[in-house]
Amino acid sequence: MQQRALLLSALVAVARAQQAGTQTSENKPSLTWQKCTASGCTDQSGSVGIDANWRWVHSTDGTTNCYTGNEWDADLCPDDETCATNCALDGADYSGTYGVEADGDSLSLTFKTGSNVGSRLFLMEDDSTYQMFKLLNQEFTFDVDVSALPCGLNGALYFVSMDADGGLSKYENNKAGAKYGTGYCDSQCPRDLKFINGQGNVDGWEPSDNDANAGVGGHGSCCAEMDIWEANKISTAEAGQTMCDGDSCGGTYSSTRYAGTCDPDGCDFNPYRMGNESFYGPGKIVDTSSKMTVVTQFITSDNTATGTLSEIKRIYVQDGKVIANSASDVSGVSGNSITSDFCTAQKKAFGDEDVFAKYNGMSGMGEGLEQGMVLVMSLWDDHNSNMLWLDSTYPTDATASDPGVARGTCGADSGKPTDVESASADAKVVFSNIKVGAIGSTYSS
Ligand SMILES: *[C@@H]1O[C@H](CO)[C@@H](O)[C@H](O)[C@H]1NC(C)=O
């Protein structure tokens, strides 16, 4: 059904679809990062591009909005195919519209700018190509300042299996490509995307009842996701690895991008949730009132880039001090890193269904990690659960003293988008000093 729809639209809308607009010139902020080996690090000149979903979508032949607030224009977008034919994604004013500022190796994302809320940026290799990272047997390191990120916000850094060109070559209807931030996918199979595979996501679109800028369409875009960092100044969850099941993952390396049998939960390590309440936070061992370095190591079974992923290890560096991740203090769960055993024990201790193992957890990530993944940096609030899963007691009706329920010190009433968007409009996250390379090559004390 899906295949047929795609084929048909490819025939009908040959050269005109989801085009690129020219009202605002697209000038991506430059961002320097580094590749490292045992003998040192070398500068790479990259840039960041904002996701298509944040961009102005307007008529290809003028400036009429195709999408306003959380609704599609019925004339320009009566259905998926026609919408892609009639509408263009435009260039972005990064700092003026989206509060995105880059300076050297540093990227600052401000939460609210005018009516814009949050942002999602991709690291680019060049103006129309996402930078691909192959992380097996590698170490990924960055500095982050979360001191201006209160309860309810999430400054996230993660990897997803997107096409390097944003789907430009694969989907004839996509004329915008990575230059305009197309092709996003993740393990939640997001259905709030305005365009997927060069088509509008108009059919079945339901405007959100609590988000003035978003809605949910008939299609989702699924792919493997490797979370390095989801955090604010109160709590952090690291390296929650989420898995899909082969072709049904959808995404770059599958025949069925829409399928969506991802493991949406993955397996993560939040020190507070794992029983250490004094490890991460303002004034704590990893002190979130100032900048810190976050190191993540992707260890393979045979210590080569072709081995299977066996362990994801976290180390912090702050004020010249190397700080090992805290160890689990939860009964029945041991260790301070993510391994298959840790994930299985954690799911059991917390009474969660072990979807992670079902999708072959650690070792199953293989293809995505080996093929390369795109680096995403974002700042967001949570219209579904007020970010309580990260920084408070969750589920809200559970007993806080039960294993896995307490995740941070934020109140049960905190994190409501209407509150944070007015009270914390100036909140921001700063990512800087991104480095990737051989294990042990990207940090020192
Ligand atoms: C929390 O982690 C730190 C650093 O690993 C450790 O020194 C401390 O004993 C831990 N506290 C608890 C309650 O586990």
Image: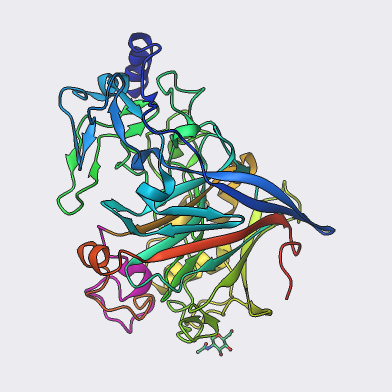
| Whether residue 151 is visible | yes
Depth order, front residue of 328/236: 236
Write the residue at 43% across / 37% down. Answer: 248
Verify whether residue 397 appears in magenta: yes
Q: What residue range appears in magenta?
A: 383-403
Single out the residue that lies furthest toward the right: 39
Residue 82, above or below 244: above
| Whether residue 138 is visible | no
Coordinates of residue 46 in the picture (x, y in percent): 61, 44
Depth order, front residue of 430/122: 430
| On-image quarter of the N terminus | top left
For residue 13, side relative to residue 341 (left or right): left
For residue 163, side relative to residue 379 (left or right): right
Depth order, front residue of 413/41: 41
- Res 68 → quadrant: top left
Write the residue at 27% across / 66% down. Answer: 420
Verify whether residue 257 appears in magenta: no
Write the residue at 55% across / 85% down. Answer: 285
Which is the main secondary structure of the residues drawn in magenta?
loop
| On-image quarter of the C terminus | bottom right
Coordinates of residue 344 in the picture (x, y in percent): 50, 65
